[in-house]
Amino acid sequence: MVKCRRSTLMRTALGLVLLTMSTGPLSAAADVLSAAITPANTRIGFTINGIGWPQTKGIFAAFRGRLRVDFANPAKSFVAVKIQAASVDAGGSSITAYIRSSAMLDVAQHPVVDFRSTSVRRTGAQTVALTGLLSFFGAVHPVTFTVRVLSKPGQRPLAFVATGAIQRSAFGFNSGQPLISDTARITIASIGRGL
Amino acid sequence: MSDRPRWSRAQRWSHQLSGAVILAALVSAIAMNRLVSDQGLRFTLYQVHKTLGIVALVLVLWRIGLRWRAVLPEPISPAWQNALSIGTHRLLYGLIFVIPLTGWALISASPLKIPTRIFGLLPLPDMLPTSLPLYLALLKAHAWLGWALGAVLVLHVSGALAHIRDGTFASIWREGKG
């Protein structure tokens, strides 16, 4: 009895929240979140498998970007990030120096990794498919990230984790193959506070 | 007794140095493959291991040169022990010459193209072109030969310890009666 009454109450409350979120000029501003992407609120990591060597993990420590989330119309959302390739860090000076060198990322030749979204599609209550163009290692290719929103609807800051994978060969980045796998996984975790 | 040939100072020093470097190479090999989980430290250990291997190779070449010219101390043990000793030493020399070479060959053939710098400075050139099958085969051989070296070293040290009383053990450690 009590349970039943509570759930009805919650449904009504939820309905009210949704109603205020989706209608009226009052809620329009709250439906859009604009946030900066900086190392202070975002972590950009990668993992890559290898033969005879456990999975290698690393991060990029220097980047800047912008995030615009349109909750009412997700397709109008937008992300752009510019990463300094030389900021790669694999947790040790010798391995990091190797990854930066011309044998791997060749950061002197390819100093910037750039991503800008081209389409955003809602795929579930808390998930979004984010496709964009990744400019990396002198090539540009589309990459799709699965974005999982961790924070509850309406909750701020907006916490999310984006996961995606690139085929290194598509970018002509074949160093270490086939000992180092062609697929590199990218994980971006961020909390977006409104500007 | 006193004019019996003995190990020269250079032979004694090169033996001690070689022993320390080989032990360090074996310990680093086990650590980087089986003990260390931190990827940065593991990578660094590989680089240290490569330097140790090349130093071991230089030392064994020096020692073979010294041995070539030297008059060796005469055997004082029963014939079967001498035969075992000679066999062990030949195996040791063979292994500590071949193992660094297989290591150098495998890093040369590796598709990883990790630059090798001895003591972090001196670049080591590749002796082979890049080849994945060759790399994998050499890696396997290098590891097995390493384990074999460990086993022969146990035999070598056991033999030395068994000859503490007759002065054989001391003869490689200090000048004097050998």
Image (spheres, coloured by chain):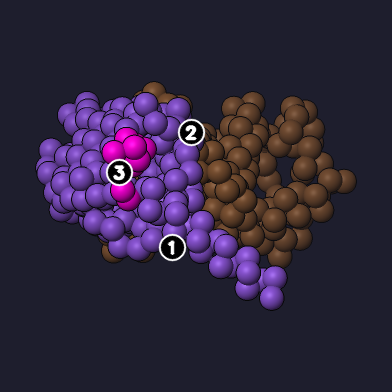
* Image position of A186 (left or right of B163): left
Q: Which residue is mark 1?
A: B140
In reply to whether residue A30 is colored magenta, the answer given is yes
Of residue A89 and residue A28, the one placed in the foreground of this image is A28
* Image position of B52 (left or right of B73): left
Tell whether label 1 touches label 2 (CB within 8 Å). no
Cα separation, mark 2 vs mark 1, equals: 27 Å
Which portion, as a residue range, is magenta? A22-33
Residue drawn 71% across the image and 37% down it? B172
Tell whether label 2 touches label 3 (CB within 8 Å). no
Q: Which residue is mark 3?
A: A24
Residue type (three-letter) at the residue carrying disc 1: Lys
Q: Chain of mark 3?
A: A
Cα separation, mark 3 vs mark 2, equals: 54 Å
Q: SS for tag 2?
A: loop
Chain ID for purple = A
Q: Nearer the viewer, mark 2 or mark 1?
A: 2
Looking at the image, is A106 positioned above or below residue A12?
above
Instruction: Mark 1: give few (<14), some (14-19) or many (20+) Cα within 10 Å.
Output: some
Is disc 3 in the same subunit as disc 2? Answer: yes
Q: At which x and y percent is residue A76?
A: 20, 45
Residue type (three-letter) at the residue carrying disc 3: Gly
Q: Which residue is mark 2?
A: A92
Chain ID for brown = B
Q: Chain of mark 2?
A: A
